[in-house]
Amino acid sequence: DQQVKQNSPSLSVQEGRISILNCDYTNSMFDYFLWYKKYPAEGPTFLISISSIKDKNEDGRFTVFLNKSAKHLSLHIVPSQPGDSAVYFCAASRDNYGQNFVFGPGTRLSVLP
Amino acid sequence: EAGVTQSPTHLIKTRGQQATLRCSPISGHTSVYWYQQALGLGLQFLLWYDEGEERNRGNFPPRFSGRQFPNYSSELNVNALELEDSALYLCASSFVRGYTFGSGTRLTVV
């Protein structure tokens, strides 16, 4: 039973355009969400987070939107750059103490020059 | 400040052998998490250690075990290796509101 789903294994976007990565979850008890980026041969690095009391969080080119009623969140990258090409993981937790995150399978983003 | 460090970077073992993977968390972090990323799959939670105790484990057989030392570093041991244990094993230490990951150990079982 996959509690966190990223239904698009891969996504290709032209440089300068918007990248939208989607994530769905099934457990209504999740209330804290993270996005991580992973380059080959490196560990995942933290990108941005959002708690359930908010519906949007922005950090530079990265914005995460949360729709609790739909159990859906998305990561927007504007404008997309070739260095953004990586695998993006969505993660969810029932608490905000950094414990017991459930990760999605990841979406491979390719930003084409 | 040093990040999360893992060793070795790569490890090749034969089926049936044992593998030991090591992790040092960020200084001051007391929790260590182990995740497995098999080819084509997401990050699967393996084990969580905090203050020297195993706090939680994922849906993995008992041949996956580990420990945390007084200095908060950790070992992951995989006994009776099987071919499907070939994966990237990631260690993370936690701060409030998220993880910091190491670069991982690539375990190949042949």
Image: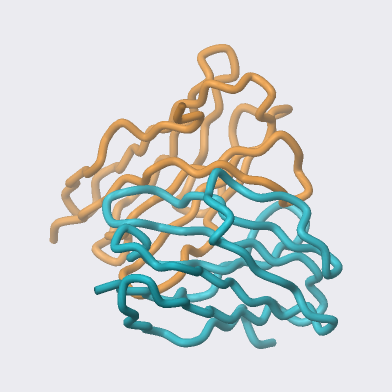
Chain colours: A orange, B cyan
Residue B16 occupies quadrant: bottom left
Between residues A112 and B44, which one lies in front from this camera angle? B44
Q: Is A63 left, or right, of B24 in this rendering?
A: left
Residue sitting at x 82%, y 77%: B28
Report whether A104 appears left or right of A57. left
Residue B89 vs residue B110, the one in the foreground: B110
In the depicted structure, whether residue A82 falls above or below residue A93 = below
Q: Residue at x 31, y 70 (%)?
A: A40
Rendered-image quadrant of the C terminus of chain B: bottom left
Residue A104 located left or right of residue B70: left
Q: From the top left corner, tell me how far across and down residue B34 is, in percent.
A: 58, 62
Task: Work out which quarter of the rendered image holds the N terminus of chain B and state it.
Answer: bottom right
Q: Outermost residue, left direction?
A: A113
Which of the 4 quarters of the picture holds residue A82? Answer: bottom left
Q: Could you tell me residue A113's position as x and y percent?
A: 13, 61
**Residue shown at 31% from the left, 31% from the top:** A7
Q: Where does residue B51 sit, x and y in percent of width and height?
A: 86, 67
| Position in image of residue A46 (x %, y %) | 55, 59
Q: Indicate whether A14 appears above or below B66.
A: above
What is the count of numbered marks?
0
Q: Toward the viewer: A63 or A91?
A: A91
Question: Farthest top residue?
Answer: A69
Of the pair A24 and A83, the residue shown nearer to us: A24
Q: Quadrant of residue A104?
A: top left
**Residue, x 54% and y 74% (percent of image)?**
B102
